[in-house]
Amino acid sequence: MDIQVSLLLTGNELMNGDIIDTNSIMFAEQLNNIGLSIHKKTTIGDDSEQLCSEIVQLSQSADLLIINGGLGPTIDDLTSPALAQACGVDLHLEPQAHLHLKKWAEKRKIMLNEPNLKQAYLPRGCKIIANATGSAVGFSMILGKCLILCTPGVPSELAQMLKDEIIPNLQQHFPEVTKPSIYRLQTFGVGESTLQAIIDDNLPNWSKDLTIGFRAAMPLLEVKLAPLNSQGVKALASYQQALNQLLGDHILHIGKSDKTTIAEYVVPLLTKSAQKITVAESCTGGLIASQITAIAGSSAVFEAGYVTYSNDMKTKMLDVPSATLTNHGAVSEATVLAMAKGALEKSNADYAIAVSGIAGPDGGTTDKPTGSVWIAWGTKETLQAKYHYIPLARRQFQQVVAARGLDLIRRMLINSKERPNYERSS
């Protein structure tokens, strides 16, 4: 059975571009995980009559209508009165919502005012959807044959409600929908076009019953295989195996992952082996250290890092010989090897990453254009360095440099014998 799902987003701030709509992505991902997909998405401003009309219209064709936003305490939060009008009921002080608000206020030691109380006046007959973090509860109504869910626009509140309340409730409401057989790979080091070329060359007769999709989230790339029918389900295993062989150690994780940096894969490997890492950064300005220390428990594997942006600091902090900088320059193999060696000696860590490059937009030369970077990595006994050319905007350049440095350490920790694709193209 094909469940028709519509998403209705409300708010002038969305229409004006004052905020970025990330909630649609959240809904799409969470719904897809349980076998539901959004068929129609509509965004409208803060207009009560238009909102009421849109609710009525969408409910006539949808089995599920999710309304996002408009549950707050201000005059432009119109979802409750618009839904009440659409359903032909009045607003009333909903007991559960009122109790939730009182507890929310008590916890923060504040007095409830009239704007706050507005969030407890909901359409009569609605069912409450608990909100563990925010002041406004969600709620649901049935209009005709359509289930309508009203959800808060604050992304952090929505994420928690999807996990705790909304998704479990939808699985109960639509028991006929089965969780799809989706195969996911989180990868690094192979771009979308390169990966597509690899697939075209090695798997030219791709099954028409199996879709492949790519979701790029700099610097990681998720690959998703989704069967379209029973034949696709049967074909899935063989394509899984083929992709695993083609991508090898470019695969960071098999299955759904919420990790966004390579550091989130490196820190557990270091923890498991009871080893430490240090960094010596120039062009990334501390980004690698920041990604490592963003992970809980990283203090067990990271004690010190060094941001040496100037040549003087490379010499003073890391003992990089002045002659090395004079003869080879800051962006050179000799310099990053000396930076890594100095960081290892001063921190007594087991592994080091050192980077020095030209992030741009200025500073490039004919011999060393903008986007040039040397990366050194390894232990005292295995230090090596490679030149990389990454012609991206400054922020993206730094992200990719940090990711490659961490990935090279990851590959050492898993004893990879493969050469990463990005070394071939640098």
Image (cartoon, rainbow, N blue to C red):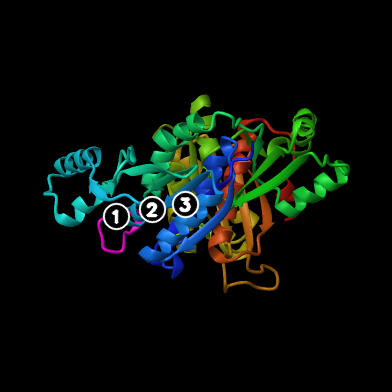
Instruction: Measure the alpha-carbon separation of dots 2 and 3.
Output: 8 Å
Residue highlighted by disc 3: 23
For disc 1, the neighbor class at 10 Å (few under 14, some 14 to 19, many from 20) is many
Q: Do the residues labelled 1 and 2 touch (CB within 8 Å)?
A: yes
Q: Residue at x 53, y 43 (%)?
A: 63
Q: Residue at x 11, y 49 (%)?
A: 111
Label 2 vs 3, first from the N-terminus: 3
Number of the front mark, 1 or 3: 1
Q: Residue at x 21, y 43 (%)?
A: 101
Residue highlighted by disc 1: 72
**Where does residue 267 sit, x and y in percent of width and height?**
50, 35
Kindly identify the amino acid type of the residue bearing the numbered disc 2: Gly
Q: Give the range drawn in magenta.
A: 71-79
Helix, strand or loop for the magenta stretch, by majority: loop
Element at label 3: helix
Question: Split into 4 quadrants, where in the image is the N terminus?
Answer: top right
> Residue 36 is drawn in which quadrant?
top right
Q: Can residue 27 be seen in this view?
A: yes
Label 1 vs 2, first from the N-terminus: 1
